[in-house]
Image (cartoon, rainbow, N blue to C red):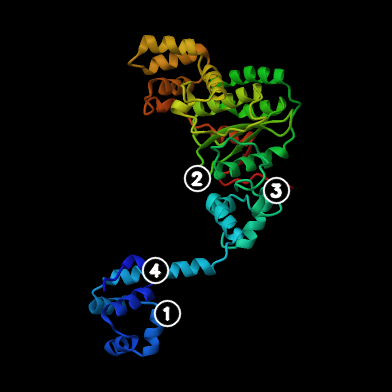
């Protein structure tokens, strides 16, 4: 009698079919294996699992590969576990929250101030709920079923949302001047006069506050790749958040002017788009760049170096850009040579060039700005 493996769904059924194929009883099998007949009965009834040692003995007796017995045993055990296991929505929620958010970094940064150890699950959950302004972690908006309190673009990651919330927390407690669109345009002209020297950038936070813009610097989180964001607390309260993850003068002014253009066009009022990886192609005007971003990129590039001047400079000096030429055009435009160098790197694609002009600027801007990160924790709720 041929054994049909496909008909056997459990290891016990396979043993029973094998016995019938050769005309053995369970008692005979017990005698051959030197086992108690009750034990054989439990195996056939799938009440006793077949281990690797027993599978090899059965292979010897019946000519059925031991792997087949073990495969059926594994499938049977898993099926029983599924039946016994009850879906736990809280466990699934915890997996999404703890797996999606950088909890350890949020604790280290002081964002979850009521907890010190990620292993304190209850404490972390309470602190997360407080951080996101909800009653329980089930309502945190990174979860698919949770109500969305912040209108962010679809490609925004949970890590980026956490960073955005921190910016929002800090900005909500800032006191700034009265906002007006006309005032922003004047502010941009004032900021342009600061680009002549790196040290002048320290005045930028105060100038932004005077025109009603809440300017916050929050260190980026691992894997977030955030450069900046523009959003509004209400109709007349714009916020610019920057990470300054690239500590370079050209990047600072490009990203800041980029976000200011978003403010001018009131971008971020209905949908917030975090500006991530604002370098290379994403800093340009190619087909893959969204219209709002193209507008902001054009304005930022023009602010750093007038593009007609840049076009002429490249046309005249390419492919060799001497040090004296970079210094010369910067002096003519009354801007820091780092801005020229930054635009040259972007326009030529040679990001390993002209680095000597790309001075660090975070330490210059930070003392006059509201900063969270690099060892400093912005005080909120005090």
On the image, the x and y values in percent for residue 257 come to 58, 24
Is the residue 162 above or below the residue 313 in the image?
below
C-alpha gap between disc 3 and disc 2: 23 Å
Residue positioned most to the front: 1
Residue 86's x, y, as percent? Answer: 57, 65
Residue depth check, mark 1 versus mark 2: number of the one nearer the observer: 1
Q: CA distance from mark 4 to mark 3?
A: 51 Å
Q: Nearer the viewer, residue 331 or 217?
A: 217
- Element on which disc 2 rests: loop
In primary-sequence order, the first of circles 1 and 4 is: 4
Residue linked to disc 3: 133
Mark 4 highlights which residue?
9
Label 3, residues with CA under 10 Å away: few <14, some 14-19, many ≥20: some
Q: Secondary structure at mark 3?
A: loop
Vertical placement of 207 versus 14: above or below?
A: above
Real-space Cα distance between discs 1 and 4? 12 Å
Task: State the residue at coordinates (39%, 80%).
Answer: 43
- Measured along the vertical axis of the image, is residue 233 above or below residue 295? below
In this view, the mark in front (4 or 3): 4
Residue named by callout 1: 45
Instruction: Using the rendered view, name the quadrant where residue 72 is placed.
Output: bottom left
Q: Which residue is mark 2?
A: 222
Q: Which comes sooner in the sequence, label 3 or label 2?
A: 3
């Amino acid at each position: 009698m041929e054994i049909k493996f496909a008909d056997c769904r459990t290891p016990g059924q396979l043993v029973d079919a094998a016995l019938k194929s050769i005309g053995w009883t369970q008692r005979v099998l017990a005698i051959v294996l030197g086992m108690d007949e009750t034990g054989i009965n439990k195996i056939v009834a799938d009440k006793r699992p077949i281990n690797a040692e027993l599978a090899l003995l059965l292979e010897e007796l019946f000519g059925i590969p031991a792997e087949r017995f073990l495969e059926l045993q594994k499938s049977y055990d898993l099926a029983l576990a599924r039946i016994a296991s009850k879906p736990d929505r809280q466990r699934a929620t915890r997996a999404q929250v703890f797996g999606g958010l950088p909890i350890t970094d949020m604790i280290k940064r002081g964002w979850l101030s009521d907890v010190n150890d990620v292993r304190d699950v209850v404490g972390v959950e309470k602190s997360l709920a407080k951080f996101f302004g909800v009653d329980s972690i089930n309502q945190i908006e990174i979860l698919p079923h949770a109500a969305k309190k912040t209108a962010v673009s679809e490609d925004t990651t949970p890590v980026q949302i956490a960073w955005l919330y921190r910016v929002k927390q800090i900005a909500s407690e800032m006191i700034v001047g009265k906002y007006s669109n006309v005032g922003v345009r004047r502010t941009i002209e004032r900021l342009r006069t600061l680009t002549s020297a790196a040290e002048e950038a320290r005045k930028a936070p105060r100038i932004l506050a005077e025109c009603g813009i809440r300017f916050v610097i929050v260190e980026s989180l691992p894997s977030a790749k955030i450069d900046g964001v523009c959003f509004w607390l209400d109709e007349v309260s714009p916020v610019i958040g920057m990470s300054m993850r690239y500590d370079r003068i050209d990047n600072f002014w490009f990203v800041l002017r980029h976000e200011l253009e978003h403010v001018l066009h009131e971008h971020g009022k209905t949908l917030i788009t975090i500006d991530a990886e604002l370098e290379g192609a994403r800093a340009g005007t190619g087909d893959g760049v969204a219209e709002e971003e193209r507008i902001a990129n054009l304005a930022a590039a023009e602010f750093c170096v007038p593009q007609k001047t840049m076009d002429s400079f490249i046309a005249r000096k390419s492919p060799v850009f001497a040090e004296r030429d970079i210094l010369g055009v910067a002096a003519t435009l009354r801007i820091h040579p780092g801005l020229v160098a930054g635009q040259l790197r972007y326009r030529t694609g040679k990001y390993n060039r002209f680095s000597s002009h790309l001075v660090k600027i975070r330490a210059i801007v930070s003392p006059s700005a509201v900063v969270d990160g690099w060892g400093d924790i912005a005080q909120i709720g005090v």
